[in-house]
Amino acid sequence: MTLHKGYRNKTRNRHRRKVRERGLGSIEKYLEDYEINDKVDIITNSSVHKRGMPHRRYHGRTGVIVGIRGRCYEVQVKLGNAKKMLIIGKEHLRLNSVSIKE
């Protein structure tokens, strides 16, 4: 068979969730709001596909919130020498641990 190059190609381990984390998770994740210029980590939640799931190459990266677009956030991520602007839902973001300590 030929190798298919779909959007979620080679993500079996990357999007796997632990047994106790399965499902949509707690309501607190959906109620959390982020401010502009907050540093966030991009950790994809595989149970939510429709609302702003980023490509697998951005999983685990850190970015800065530069704006809000509807229910999603505009996150600027550095990828090599380029800066990319991603539109990501809040289910796939978490506050960076370095910015929490400051």
Image: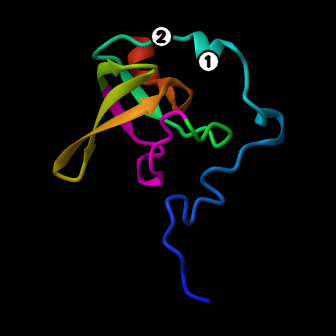
| Secondary-structure class at tag 1 | helix
Q: Give the number of callouts.
A: 2
Residue furthest to the left: 81
Per the rendered image, the range of residues in magenta is 51-64
Residue 11 pos. (x, y %): 59, 59
Examine the rendered structure and indicate whether residue 51 appears above or below residue 6.
above
Marks 2 & 1, CB-CB < 8 Å contact: no
Q: Nearer the viewer, residue 46 or 59?
A: 46
Describe residue 7's horizontal placement relative to residue 79 as left or right.
Answer: right
Mark 1: which amino acid? Lys
Residue 63 magenta-drawn?
A: yes
Residue furthest to the right: 19
Q: Which residue is mark 2?
A: 33
Mark 2: which amino acid? Asp
Residue 36 pos. (x, y %): 30, 14
Examine the rendered structure and indicate whether residue 93 appears above or below residue 16.
above
Q: Which residue is mark 1?
A: 29
Examine the rendered structure and indicate whether residue 78 appears above or below residue 97.
below
Instruction: Please report the residue visible at 40 percent of the width from the left and 41 percent of the height from the top.
Output: 61
Residue 11 magenta-drawn?
A: no
Instruction: Please report the residue visible at 45 percent of the width from the left and 43 percent of the height from the top.
Output: 54
For residue 20, which quarter of the picture?
top right
The quarter of the image holding the N terminus is: bottom right
What kind of colouring is applied to the model shown? rainbow
Q: Nearer the viewer, residue 81 or 25?
A: 25
Residue 57 pos. (x, y %): 42, 54
Circle 2 packing at 10 Å, graded few (<14), some (14-19), many (20+), is few
Circle 1 packing at 10 Å, graded few (<14), some (14-19), many (20+), is some
Describe residue 96's horizontal placement relative to residue 79 as left or right.
Answer: right
Instruction: Please report the residue visible at 51 percent of the width from the left and 66 percent of the height from the top.
Output: 6
